[in-house]
Image (cartoon, coloured by chain):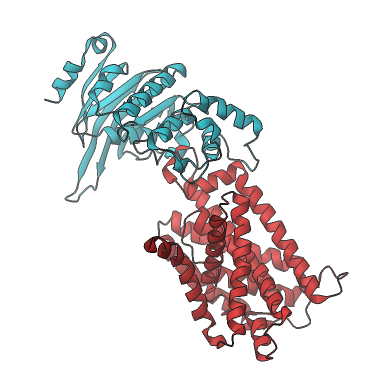
Amino acid sequence: MNYLLLRFVENNNYFGNMNFYLAAVMLGLGFVALGFGIFISMRIFNIPDITTDGSYTLGGVVSAIILVKYNSVPVAITASIVAGILSGSITGFIHTKLKVNALLAGILVMTALYSVNLSLMGRSNIPLINIPVIYDWLSFIGDTVARQLSILMLITFCLILFLSSLLRTDFGIAMRATGNSEVMVSAMGIDTSKMKIIGLAISNGLMALSGSLITQYQGFADINMGIGIIILGLGSVMIGETLMSLLKIQSISGRLFGVIIGTIFFRLILAFVLSLGIDPNLLKLITALIVLIVVCLPNLRKVSN
Amino acid sequence: MIELTNISKTFNAGTPQEVRALININLNISNEEFIVIVGANGSGKSSLLNAIAGTIIPDSGKINIEGNEVTDWKDFRRSKWIARIFQDPFKGTASELSIIDNFRLAAIRTKRKSLSIGINSKFKEMVRERIALLGLGLEDKLEQSIGTLSGGQRQALTLIMAVMDDAKILLLDEPSAALDPKTSEIIMQKADQIIKEFKLTSILITHNLKDVASYGSRVILMKEGTIASDIKGEERSKMTIKDFQEWFL
């Protein structure tokens, strides 16, 4: 996932290079769908779903296979989303119908997906060399970076429009209430099990979409591309929340916007850390540390008061 | 309206913690009856209420509501007739959602939760008018999350929420037990008023003997999972708080 950033690092031309940070912003935009997915499972439904690592990779793998075989971007992206929805539904089913702890249900599906991804690919990675991807659309924009950025921004805009509308509908209110007060929601005639399965399906569909977008951006799908991705998403959601709470924004669209800001901000922090010349092998460690700091910050503030 | 036939429920059957919560309960509740259930802790009051609500499914027996056999129906399906008020004000509302969101859910309790936006200016105006009747000044705080309100305010709102959509049956599980005496009295009066106005068939669980004496058309005393006394009609109206106190001596 940090392929591009690392390439900049290797070429030693990153410091003060605008493209380096622009690449970070674009990666961030590619991860917005992942952030939204985690926002839905962890924040809207209050379910610690860690199917993420698997469904994100699944999205990348499915897209890569279809792009290589059939050369169709819309089919690739649609199939990725459907695959993600399916894996989320399975986690939801195991959790709600088989009454398995949500964390365990997620780990089970994530673990199973590793084998699924590996057998789908037949090897550990698929490169997308000379294969048209979504970033080749809008060909009237000559500059590659401008084109990629426009496409990612367009997708991000569609996503926030879709989610903020969905969460304001009657169904969306029922979704939000489910993670908040299950007793009340059942009393209001809502099947909470069904609601949670749908929620996890949407959430993992978004994560798979993110996997597809990143795969097309970096030019390959890899079996290990999802390792630790959940921390990245969670960190983004939390950074966004901290920012929005400082600005006292509580509305649904405001909170979703916070996820976007958080995701981009997180990538920029990581880019900055890399630009300081820190060993790229330590990137996951640094990611974990940043998330730890973000999680602890509000508590530390309380303690010092 | 509601018919319970030979309802039994045992928790933790076959273990040392076995509890026979309901033993062969037979109960017929007719339209617009207001039943008050009293009894010591562990006498089966809440189990009886939960069996009607559908949050516990009995081991044996049958439950009929409005002529439908609903014995195996879960609570969310029975919600087309039943509105519920909980002892814990936090359970009856979704804290992080705004007042208006909570009211929207209540307004579509018996309906499909569709993919359309139901909160429009007309709906807001309707909710504002209804909340204003409470006289708590909450009508101007519709966008505020309901978790920022006090327990009494939330309980008052859940009462109006109960009748936002068609309701035939109102189940109240110690609705005022978590509130201070003054608020508790206001909530009980408001509940009684709503029950009469909307002609609801109601069941109230309470430990407050003053409420037992003041409200309801029928009173049931539960003991060890069975109905020990069941008094209605003229006999009930003659009873005073002293008579009820004797039940617990």
Q: Is residue A298 visible?
A: yes
With respect to residue B145, does A24 lie above or below? Answer: below
Numbered label tally: 0
Compare residues A270 and A213 and report the one nearer the observer. Answer: A270
Q: Quadrant of the C terminus of chain B?
A: top left
Q: Which residue is at a point 73% across and 67% down the rendered structure image?
A: A152
Give the percent coordinates (x, y) of residue A36: 60, 60
**Chain in cyan colour:** B
Q: Quadrant of residue A219?
A: bottom right
With respect to residue A21, does B180 lie above or below? Answer: above
Q: Is residue A123 visible?
A: no
Q: Taking A83 as reference, is B31 left or right? A: left
With respect to residue A52, does A164 lie above or below? Answer: above
Q: Taking A132 as reference, is B201 left or right? A: left
Compare residues B120 and A106 and report the one nearer the observer. Answer: B120
Q: Residue furthest left?
A: B249
Compare residues A221 and A232 and report the one nearer the observer. Answer: A232
**Chain in red colour:** A
